[in-house]
Amino acid sequence: MQICMDWRSVKFDWNKARAFLVTAEEGSLSAAARALGMAQPTLGRQVDGLEQELGIVLFERVGRGLTLTPSGLELLDHVRAMGEAAGRVSLTALGQSQALEGTICISASETYASVLLPPIIKKLRAEEPGIQVEVVVSNHASDLRRREADIAIRNFRPTEPDLIARKVGDADAILYATPDYIASIGHPTKPYDLRHADFINMDHSGMMMKGLNTLGLGLTEANFPLLTESYIVMWELVRQGAGIGILDAYIGDAEPCVRRVLPDLEPIVFPIWLVAHRELTTNRRIRRVFDFLAQELRRDREDAPLALGS
C-alpha cells in the first residue's frame, strides 16, 4: 500500500509527527508520553490529529500496546528521516552560537532534579542571569540527538559516537528503611535476614531484584509488593515505613526519618555522567553550563548531603 496525497495541501505539524514517531518507537502511548515528558492524553490527541490531517489510520491496538498499520509503517521511515534531518540542522545552528544569553535544557532523574539541581541552578542564575534554564524531569534517558535536552545527568556512560560525556563522580546506592520497619523485621544483621522483608520496586524488568541478590539477599518477586517508577513516591513510601528502598547515599543519609539497613552491606556503586551532543560543545552557552554543572556536582559530593523532602 502506498500513501497517495498532495503533500503541498497538508498543513504539517512537526509536534504531531514527533508524537507519532516516538509512539511508534516506544510501542505504546504511555511509554511515549514518559519518553517525551508529557501527559498521555495530550500525546494521544496529537497522534489522533495527525491521523485526521493525513486521512489515514496509523496504529492498531494490540492488547495494551500499539502496532503500526501498513500506512503507518510507510510513513514512519519518512518521519524518522525528517526528524534526523531536523535534529542535524538544529544541532549545527545551535553549535555555532556564541551568545551566552538564552535558554538551556537540562535533563535529570526526579531525585537529581529535585535535590541536586535547584541550588546549582540558583548559583548559575546568580552568575549568569542571561541564561534561562528548563529542567526536564525523566527517569528515562532523554534523546540528546533529537534535542530532547541539551545536557543530561545520567548514571551510565553513553556509547553513541556523537555524544560526549564527562564523569563527575560515583554514587553509592544504599538500602534504607525507618527504624520502626527495621525493628518489625527483627533488626537484620545479615543479607539473608532480609528474605522476608518488603522492598519498593522501581522497574518491571526485575533488574533491581537481580542486583540485590548479587549481594546475597535471596529475594523473590514476593519481596516486591510495591512498584512505582517515581523515585519521589518510592522515597515517601520508605519514609512512611512501607518497606525498604534504595537511594543515593548522598541523599538518603541526610534524611532523619530513615536508617541504613545493614550498614555494613556493600553498596551498589554507579557513576554520575554529564552528557551532551558533540555538536553543542562549540556553543558558548552550553559549554559554560556544562562546565559549571561538572564543577558543582563534584563539589556537592565533597560537601554535606542534602535531604530529599521534609
Image (cartoon, rainbow, N blue to C red):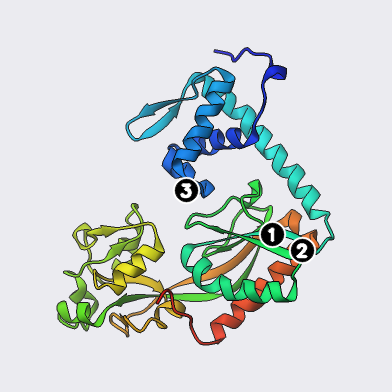
Whether residue 18 is visible, yes or no, is yes
Mark sitting on residue 87: none
Label 1 amino acid? Answer: Ile
Q: Is residue 111 left or right of residue 144?
A: left
Label 3 amino acid? Answer: Arg
Q: How far across and down, in percent of the image, does residue 283 sit?
A: 79, 59
| Mark 1 lies on residue | 104
Q: Is residue 153 left or right of residue 162?
A: left
Whether residue 215 is visible, yes or no, is no
> How crowded is the residue under tag 1: few (<14 C-alpha within 10 Å), some, or many (20+)?
some
Q: Which of 73 and 310 lies nearest the eye of the viewer?
A: 310
Q: Which of 220 and 241 lies nearest the eye of the viewer?
A: 241
Q: How far across and down, in percent of the image, does residue 147 sit?
A: 65, 49
- Cα–Cα span, label 3 and label 2: 28 Å
Task: Give the residue displayed 35% in from the left and 29% down from the top.
Answer: 62
Badge 3 vs badge 2, beta-carbon distance below 8 Å: no
Q: Is residue 161 left or right of residue 267?
A: right
Indicate which disc, 3 or 1, sits on the residue closer to the N terminus. 3
| Mark 2 lies on residue | 285
Count of numbered circles in the view: 3
Q: Is residue 98 left or right of residue 153?
A: right
Name which quarter of the figure residue 249 lies in: bottom left
Q: Is residue 14 above or below residue 110?
A: above
| Mark 3 lies on residue | 34
Q: Is residue 114 above or below residue 55?
A: below
Q: How far across and down, in percent of the image, does residue 28 sit?
A: 43, 37
Label 2 amino acid? Answer: Arg
- Cα–Cα span, label 1 and label 2: 8 Å
